[in-house]
Image: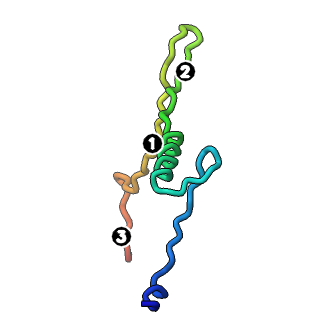
Amino acid sequence: MKSDKKKRPIVHVLPVRKQDRTWAWNNKEKTDVFAEHLERTFQPNEEKTLVNSRRGVKTPIYLIPPIKVKQSRYRPGVAQRVPGS
């Protein structure tokens, strides 16, 4: 039986630091700390608006990534080179 204990690795479960600088040792406390962390991290974004100074109208600003246009390698009317010629 003593050889069984030597074969198994020792698993250390580390505590998690809470917001109040104390340690969470059991799984319930750790899940509560992790849930609070996720709640603070993933907050909804505030709506960004642009105010038109003349009219006082708020216009929402939408962040859209730029569109990349691919250049075609095919040009009509131009003879294409054939590999090996």
Q: What residue is rendered at 54% in x and 57% in y?
A: 25
Q: Earlier in the sequence, mark 3 or mark 1?
A: 1
- Residue 75 in percent (x, y) is at 38, 53
Q: Nearer the viewer, residue 1 or 17?
A: 1
The tally of labels here is 3
Mark 3 in CB contact with mark 1 (< 8 angstroms): no
Distance, label 1 to label 2, CA atoms, is: 23 Å
Left or right of 19 in this view: 47: left
Which tag is nearer the camera, tag 1 or tag 2? 2
Q: Amino acid type of disc 3?
A: Val
Q: Residue furthest right?
A: 21
The dot on residue 67 is 1
In the rendered view, tell whether residue 37 sits above or below residue 26.
above
Quadrant containing the C terminus in the rendered view = bottom left
- Residue 3 in percent (x, y) is at 45, 91
Q: What kind of element bears circle 3? A: loop
The dot on residue 82 is 3
Quadrant containing the N terminus in the rendered view = bottom left
Q: What kind of element bears circle 2? A: strand
